[in-house]
Image: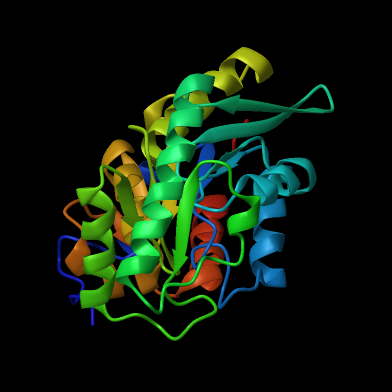
Amino acid sequence: MGLPISTKLPLISELPDSWWAPIRAIFFDIDDTFSTHGKITSEAFASLWKLFEAGFILVPVTGRPAGWCDHIARFWPVHAVVGENGAFTMMMVDGKLKTIHTLEPQASEEARAKLLTLRQKVFQSFSEATLASDQDFRWYDLAIDTSEDVAPWSEEKIDSLVSLCEVHGAVAKVSSIHVNAWFGQYSKSDGMKRAMAELKVHCDIDLKMNEIVFLGDSPNDEPLFAATEKSIGVANLKRSLHRLKKLPSAITHAESGEGFSEAVTHLLARRSPS
């Protein structure tokens, strides 16, 4: 069980209008922040369209793979998408998909070789280890399923897997469904900053940090809770508070996609971009 919400983590309904006023961009996690039990509800997707039509800048920042992000960049009402925990940014520029990679080509090849070795070590150490169902669509990381399509792993076993990855030189992050491991010094917050830079170059969208809010739900979102001036956790983040050193600015009443829609309702009621 997660820690109880303390007075240091207010509900979003307690935030003043002045907190919401500068916001014109929403960066958000997907799994269990925008989605609910593996589905994107009609309410959550409608909320995304409401933001888009109101003129907000929208950027998912996810641990999901390149194959998924290609679809998201092309077909969702978003301006860019950051995938595999910061490994790349995808966006549509003049009707064409543009991908900006974080690692240089040689570093990418070296990282992929190390991932193959790490994958062997994981399967040698954890007999129950299963690759995430979306692993075939990944370019840069190893995703081990810890609850999506398998019985949930214990906290202790997840910690052991993270430790194994780190011992072998990988970065390892815990999401609500996977443990993701990769080689290269980047994170979701690095991905956000790269997306901001690319939006300025290719779309003439110049964002300041006080104009951004980030929504997330799990420990791998902590880099963005730390990097953004304004952040919101959906209520299911309560289960992971014991894993976080940096908390979001506030939390929603509702969980997952319903919490996302709750935040959108507050934002649209208190702030309309010109």
Say which of 262 and 62 sits in front: 62
Q: Is residue 42 left or right of residue 13?
A: right
- Depicted 43 relative to depicted 80: above or below: below
Q: Is residue 126 left or right of residue 70?
A: left
Colouring rule applied to residues: rainbow
Q: Residue at x 56, y 74 (%)?
A: 36
Q: Is residue 29 left or right of residue 174?
A: right
Total numbered circles: 0
Q: Position of residue 272 (x, y in %)?
A: 59, 41
Is residue 239 in view?
yes
Identity of the residue furthest to the bottom in this view: 151
Identity of the residue furthest to the right in this view: 95
Q: Position of residue 142 (x, y in %)?
A: 46, 53
Quarter of the image for residue 152 reads bottom left
- Depicted 83 relative to depicted 119: above or below: above
For the N terminus, the image quarter is bottom left
Quarter of the image for residue 155 reads bottom left
For the C terminus, the image quarter is top right
Is residue 211 in view?
no
Q: Position of residue 9 (x, y in %)?
A: 22, 62
Say which of 139 and 89 sits in front: 139
Q: Residue at x 64, y 65 (%)?
A: 44
Q: Residue at x 30, y 37 (%)?
A: 227
Q: Position of residue 167 (x, y in %)?
A: 20, 50
